[in-house]
Image (cartoon, rainbow, N blue to C red):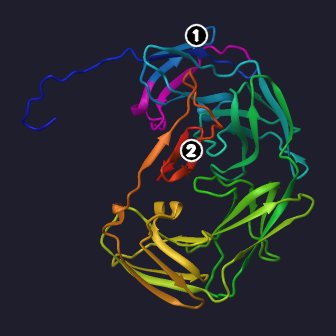
Amino acid sequence: VLEGKTTENVEVVLTSGGTVEGYVYDTEGRPQPNVTLYFEELSGYGEEVGRLATVVTDSAGFYRATGLPEKICEVRRSNLWNSIGVARRVIVPANGKTFKLDFGGKNTVTGQVIIDGTPLANTKLLLGDVAAPSSGILICYAMTDDEGRFVFASPPPGQYAIYYKRPQKQNDQVKIATIDVGTESTDIGVIPEQTTKVLVSVSTADPNVILDGAMVYLYEETGFGRRPMGEIKQQDNKDGRYVINNVAQGKYTIYLMRADHVIFFEEFEVANTDTDTEVLVEMGKNPAKVVGRLAGESQQGLVIWRQDKKVMADIRPGEDGAFRIDSLPPGQYSIGGSLMYHYNKGALATFELMEGQTKAVDLDISNLFDQSFASLQSLIISNNGIPLSGAEVWLEGATGEIDPVIVSSQGQFFLA
């Protein structure tokens, strides 16, 4: 539409939209009347501006929503955060078709949570996405009893994780199990499985390195978009180590961010749960520093990283463009946009940093967005409009296979 111009012969095509219907059940598998469900755009974040429909179940627990667009819809109970049972699902309606979407049913997933030999009693558990518990295609809640036993009421088939919230920690969900849910009731037994304690030590001879206020997390495997797991206690006053409890066998990465926002990554494997696992994060005996000035403007943030991806930091220039990063261990470093860091493409500068060296690096970032990156987001859905969790997806092209940067039940995000 142009100001002062008349646009003619515009064709507007209206569709009937899609229909979604189903039943809402309580935790005992009984139909629930008078339950309010919101249909919202996935990016609506609960705001009415993104709301597509509001429905209320009838006396038989049945609902129907019509005229829905062909886009990813979040369907949730109006009292999402206070619910028990299936509280949130995701569906992709199709024009002229009717899809079924139930909340709950007869089948159950049962088990018991025991942490450090003690039942996790009277605690709310969340069954959800393996990477993003609060925003996946399913949110299902259950409460443990005095013995730590729980019942998840009829979650749909798929691969999910079970979380609990640490006391006094806002929005801090600790993953304790990853499970595959089928079409039949199942008892998964005691979770988590055999675990051990991880002790994280930091090695540095630089008196300028201050670890007060450092943040330490445990990540599953490696890679961008992973979520931390495992309960982390404060630094031990006796020997200065960080303690992470309840870690099962597997491969992990320690994420340690100092108060100056320099981040260290250390990969390790827990092969034996009979003994504690010790991890050492090396910060260097005679650290170096990088100073410089940025010319030009860019809306994309810059990062500096070591070639082995064990050290990285955001570059935070002042108003005059000057920046300084202290106490870096020696090695081969690069500077570039955050996307360049994750995909090893198009660094603006690469240099060797020696022990005790002060390296000056001045950069013009005016053409930072000239890099040839493209992105793609995919979503795998069933014939009934239900996104499939646990799907393995990759791209193939002239440059070979490209793995996704982020994988969740809401889709796979590729960058190349």
Query: Looking at numbered disc 1 in the image, what kind of residue is underneath it?
Result: Asp
Q: Reading the chain from its start, which is encountered first: label 2 or label 1? A: 1
The tag on residue 58 is: 1
Numbered range of the magenta stretch: 29-52
Q: Residue 249, relative to residue 80: is it above or below? A: below
Q: Residue furthest top?
A: 59
Query: In the displayed structure, does residue 204 sit left or right of residue 338?
Result: right
Point 72% across, 51% down: residue? 166
Q: Position of residue 194 (x, y in %)?
A: 88, 50
Q: Residue furthest front?
A: 398
Q: Secondary structure at mark 2?
A: loop
Is residue 36 highlighted in magenta?
yes
Q: Residue 312, relative to residue 161: is it above or below? A: below
Q: Residue 132, relative to residue 206: is it above or below? A: above
Q: Cα distance, mark 2 to mark 1?
A: 43 Å
Residue at which label 2 appears: 394
